[in-house]
Image: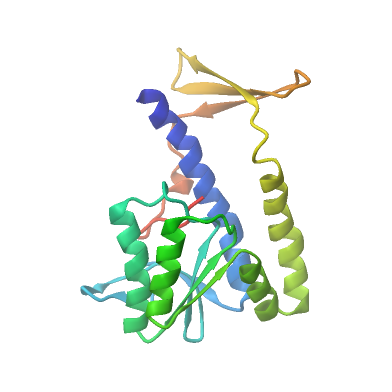
């Protein structure tokens, strides 16, 4: 259980930093802006004092960006939040638009897409999501997104099935551990993970990033 908690530090921060990297680029390419929960135009139906974090707002469109939607990434409570986001957008007079870059199928993705359609929203998955971005971005920004977002993600995905041998060692004298990866040629890659919280990664808004990876 302790190792599981420590590994979560890597997974959670990786997901957050991935979102921090790509979401502003995608929002800018669409000509919109992201909103935190405090100043969001999308308010919660059950409590208008609370807002919804929105990845991108363009005119009356409210975009939700996802790298991937998996069955494991969203528990019942978290997934109900995902569904209610679409409903809150409709209630606020905005059309919810779901963009999922990875087309890997899951019943959660099906349910989420169906909910967006039910409230007159739109869902773009995989190639359809990239095509939508390119059409809305224009030639210059579409080229930028292709080079600095789509290709890097595709490069990572291309090696997703090539699992390397893993070795993890606890550093007994400090709150940290080392991770080593070994390839078939015997080359190893090592880095040190500290358990000291990085305050720069702490979100000030009421909600964290909604990205599933």
Residue at left offset 65%, top offset 73%: 133
**Residue 39 can be seen, yes or no:** no
Location of residue 83 (image quadrant)? bottom left
Relative placement, left or right, of 142 versus 12 is right
Q: Position of residue 77 (x, y in %)?
A: 28, 55
Relative placement, left or right, of 118 versus 14 is left
Q: How is the image coloured?
A: rainbow
Q: Position of residue 79 (x, y in %)?
A: 34, 58
Q: Position of residue 6 (x, y in %)?
A: 43, 29
Looking at the rendered image, the quarter that the N terminus falls into is: top left
Q: How many marks?
A: 0
Q: Is residue 51 above or below residue 9?
A: below
Q: Position of residue 93 (x, y in %)?
A: 37, 87
**Residue 17 can be seen, yes or no:** yes
Relative placement, left or right, of 170 versus 135 is left
Q: Is residue 132 above or below residue 193?
A: below
Residue at left offset 49%, top offset 15%: 171
Location of residue 85 (image quadrant)? bottom left
Residue nearer the viewer, 67 or 149: 67
């Amino acid at each position: 259980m302790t190792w599981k908690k420590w590994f979560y530090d890597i997974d959670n921060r990786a997901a957050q930093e991935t979102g921090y990297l790509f979401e502003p680029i995608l929002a800018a390419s669409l000509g919109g802006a992201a909103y935190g929960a405090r100043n969001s135009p999308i308010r919660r139906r059950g409590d208008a004092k609370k807002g919804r974090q929105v990845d991108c707002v363009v005119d009356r469109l409210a975009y939700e960006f996802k790298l991937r939607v998996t069955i494991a990434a969203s528990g019942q409570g978290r997934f109900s939040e995902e569904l209610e986001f679409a409903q809150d957008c409709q209630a606020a007079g905005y059309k919810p638009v779901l963009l999922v870059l990875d087309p890997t199928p899951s019943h959660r993705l099906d349910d989420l897409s169906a909910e967006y359609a039910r409230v007159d929203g739109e869902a773009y998955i995989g190639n359809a999501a990239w095509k939508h971005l390119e059409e809305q971005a224009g030639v210059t920004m579409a080229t930028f997104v292709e080079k600095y977002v789509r290709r890097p993600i595709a490069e990572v995905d291309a090696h997703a099935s090539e699992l390397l041998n893993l070795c993890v060692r606890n550093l007994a004298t400090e709150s940290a551990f080392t991770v080593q990866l070994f390839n078939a040629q015997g080359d190893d890659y090592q880095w040190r993970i500290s358990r000291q919280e990085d305050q720069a990664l702490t979100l000030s808004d009421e909600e964290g990033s909604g990205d599933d990876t």
